[in-house]
Image (cartoon, rainbow, N blue to C red):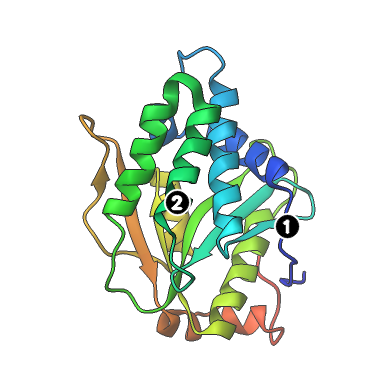
Amino acid sequence: MTFELEPTEDVDEVADILTSAFHEDPVIGWMVPHELPGRDVYVKGFMHAWVRFMLDHEGTALMSPGRDATLVWEPSEREPITAADQEAFEAAITAVTGPAAGRCRQLIDLLDAHYPTDLPPHVHGALAAVRPGSSSPGAFVRLAGAMMLHLYRNGLGVYCEASSESSSALWQRFGSLPIRPPILLPGTDIALTPLYMSIEDITRHPALPVLLGDHQPLTA
């Protein structure tokens, strides 16, 4: 298995994977309630707008060869996001999320408000998902490996907010650790878990020799 992957610009397919994968996610369920008619259209619209915004501002999207898993990140060190850029992003969300627009914007605002400002250079692992029913074993392992190679080669850590217990467990399996109190959604007990893995942790990660081609491949 090679862990070298070229970034994708297929935002529509990435958004489709994310929409399927996050269908039962508690945070997305708060953002766009399950009882809302046309729910998947609004969720996909939100995902599309967010991924497009990140790619337009130095972000990276990876997609597995089987088109059943995706990972999207944005760098902590990039050209500043202008007020006009932010307004355009909010307008893009509003245009495609109908009656869910308020909570969609509220979620982005919540993530921004709780984003740590004291971390060394890193990437924000904003979105990661595997399409339900995927028949490709190790699809996400390959994406995570590609990201870890990028981090290692560029001397970067990774920060993310896990939106479920299973997501948090997966990120911790790859070496990230909780670094902040949970981020609670307004008026609920639904929380996102902030996690971080430093470049030092990545450098001594047991999987790194495998990623660099020195040992036997990883298993899912």
Q: Label 2: how many residues lie within 10 Å, few (<14), some (14-19) or many (20+)?
A: few
Q: Which residue lies furthest to the front in this view?
A: 84
Give the spatial CA distance, label 1 vs label 2.
26 Å
Name the image quarter holding the C terminus: bottom right
Query: In the image, residue 173 lies at what x, y percent?
Result: 46, 62
Residue bearing the label numbered 1: 8
Q: Position of residue 25 (x, y in %)?
A: 45, 34
Image-quadrant location for residue 146 = bottom right
Residue at left 71%, top 71%? 3
Q: Residue 81 carries which label?
A: none
**Tag in front: 1 or 2:** 2
Label whose residue precedes the other's in the sequence (1 or 2): 1
Residue at disc 1, secondary structure: loop
Mark 1 neighbour density, 10 Å: few (under 14) some (14–19) many (20 or more): some
Question: Is residue 158 visible in this depiction of the protein?
Answer: yes
Q: In which quarter of the image is residue 158?
A: bottom left
Which residue in the structure is indicated by mark 2?
84
User: Picture coordinates of residue 213 (x, y %)?
Assistant: 72, 83
